[in-house]
Amino acid sequence: MSDGQNDLNDSNEENEPNRQQAQPFPADPRPDTPSQQPAAAPRLPPPRRGADWMFGGVYGTVLASGLLAALDQAGEAFTPFYDASWVLVTACAAGLAHGYSHHMTTHQAGSAAHRWRVLSRALWNEWPMIVAALPTVLLLVVAGLTDWASYGVTAVGLGLNTALLFAWGSFVALRVGYRIGSALLMGLADATIGLAIIVANAVIK
């Protein structure tokens, strides 16, 4: 009798590890919650390292064309020096505004002196926009010195700026590696903006 009891006990002891292994793992008392790690701050684009010829050239030329067309009012006295000053002031203001906004959208941590240096560089990099408006300014100055009629000045200025848009687009496309055919097509696409201003000026007036 005792031998049977001992065999039964030995069998229970052998099966005990199996029963323990079959038991499910205890449920995790913690509820399913998202990770509590703080989200990484969004990475800001790095500040520009140089002037943007393409943007500045095209933007400044288009701006000058629009101002030249708008300042020429039929039936009013032609004031070329006044118009030239406003074209130049507007180009400078647009360049400063664009440089400042670009600086703010790419703001990086640093000392006050470092931030002022970065801002100064961002503003200086807008010089292509001002340079692109200078042909229109010089044309208006020449018109004032030679008593050139407003209609002729506007026609020549819009045509000149359209040609400059073509030159800007083609030149920059060649600089970044486009073939000559593709570069000329990009220049033609930029010149289309100047043609659109010419058409708008004719329709409005």
Image: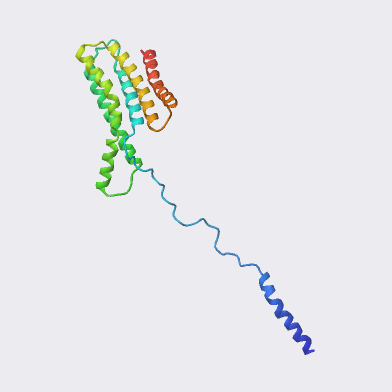
Q: Is residue 24 left or right of residue 62?
A: right
Q: Is residue 38 above or below residue 145?
A: below
Q: Residue furthest bottom?
A: 2
Q: Quadrant of the C terminus?
A: top left
* Residue at 31 percent of width and 14 percent of height: 156
Q: Residue furthest right?
A: 1
Q: Quadrant of residue 17?
A: bottom right
- x and y percentages locating residue 62 in the rendered image: 34, 24
Q: Is residue 184 left or right of residue 81?
A: right
Q: Quadrant of residue 14?
A: bottom right
Q: Is residue 127 above or below residue 21?
A: above
Q: Is residue 69 visible?
A: no
- x and y percentages locating residue 34 in the rendered image: 51, 55
Q: As rendered, which of 21 and 184 lies closer to the eye?
A: 184
* Residue at 78 percent of width and 88 percent of height: 3
Q: Quadrant of residue 173?
A: top left
Q: Is residue 201 above or below residue 116?
A: above
**Number of marks:** 0
Q: Is residue 10 visible?
A: yes
Q: Is residue 39 above or below residue 48?
A: below
* Residue at 33 percent of width and 31 percent of height: 53
- x and y percentages locating residue 22 in the rendered image: 68, 69
